[in-house]
Amino acid sequence: MIPANRTTADTDRAASLMGVSKGTFTNTRRWEKLSARPISRPGAKTRFWDEEQLLAAVEEREIPLITPANPDEVFNVAVEDESVLGLLRGFLTGYFTGAGSSAPLIDGARIAPAAETGFERVEVFSVYAADEAPEAAEDAVVDVNVKLVAYNEKGAWPLNAQLRLEFAGGRWVVAALAREDEDDLFDLEEAYLLVPEDRRPTISTWRTYATSTNRKSERLTSIPEADTEVHGVKHWKRSTIANWDQHERFLQGEAKAGGRPAGSADRAPRRRTQPLLAQADERRAKLQELLAENPAITPAEAGAALGVSAERGRQLLNEAKAGAKK
């Protein structure tokens, strides 16, 4: 994933910064020695980096913060320190509601303006750190990933934010913020994973959707043209894929799941409806038990316990927590 408004550097640029030829850089795998990791998808034929991170790595400075493509793979250590959790609640509430925040910021903190304010309140569900839990020691630095839900008059909105915290002057302060953005860019394989699992086609079908020949017929499903090319690789914006999934795909050749003409009567008894409803009720009941035992349970943990995907686990968690507020 390429975070919005970032400049990328390809292999030529990386080799030049390290003072070696492209062949030497590639054949000796010099890129593995860089503390800045590629932001291109693992296994991608074309490898590229965030320019600012790459410069910091070459100059042996601290790597600036950007949101990773899959934060759940990077952040896997649960944070339970109440001083950290309290700081995050205060900062994110102020950030997303626009009500201001008493949360301390370090001098020069990189805090992008909120894409949308006007939320009424924010609820933090889980906080995970990368590599190890934060330790309250002077000059300690830790990156954390926060999953939260922001509420307004239209409903509940799941959000994700990544923050860098620094321990300075005897307390934790916010040093940087990165967050999901509608203009984040994804290659074809990454864009595929943006589609919720319960609506995701097979990968071979997805690749067929992306072929230009599909667009010659309005009756064949296709995804939109790529928004841009990065070093010769087609990329789509997060918003482009979300809009296609929610509004466009079913106007093409793909039929909506489950549907029949409104008002049509049953031709025969529904044999599977009741078992499916019972299964859904069982999952909701089990989720309530899980929440009672662990209010901070993550979507991935909920999904694994219920035998569903992490995305479905997130949906069920949001549904359960929204119901509890009523």
Image: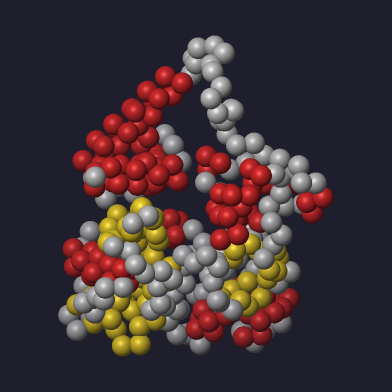
Question: Image height check: is 288 above or below 156?
Answer: above
Q: Position of residue 107 (x, y in %)?
A: 31, 88
Res 58 visible: no
Q: Residue at x 62, y 85 (%)?
A: 17
Q: Quadrant of residue 119?
A: bottom left
Using residue 127 as the reference point, say whether residue 206 is left or right of it: right
Q: Residue at x 71, y 59 (%)?
A: 225
Residue nearest the observer in this picture, 125 or 131: 125
Residue nearest the observer in this picture, 117 or 141: 117
Q: Quadrant of the C terminus?
A: top left
Q: How many marks?
A: 0
Q: Position of residue 160 (x, y in %)?
A: 40, 61
Res 211 visible: yes
Q: Residue at x 34, y 43 (%)?
A: 319
Using residue 322 as the reference point, say whether residue 241 is left or right of it: right
Q: Residue furthest front?
A: 263
Question: Image height check: is 111 above or below 119?
Answer: below
Q: Position of residue 187 (x, y in %)?
A: 64, 60
Using residue 322 as the reference point, say whether residue 248 is left or right of it: right
Q: Quadrant of residue 183?
A: bottom right
Q: Quadrant of the N terminus?
A: bottom right
Q: Residue at x 42, y 19 (%)?
A: 274
Q: Quadrant of residue 256?
A: top right
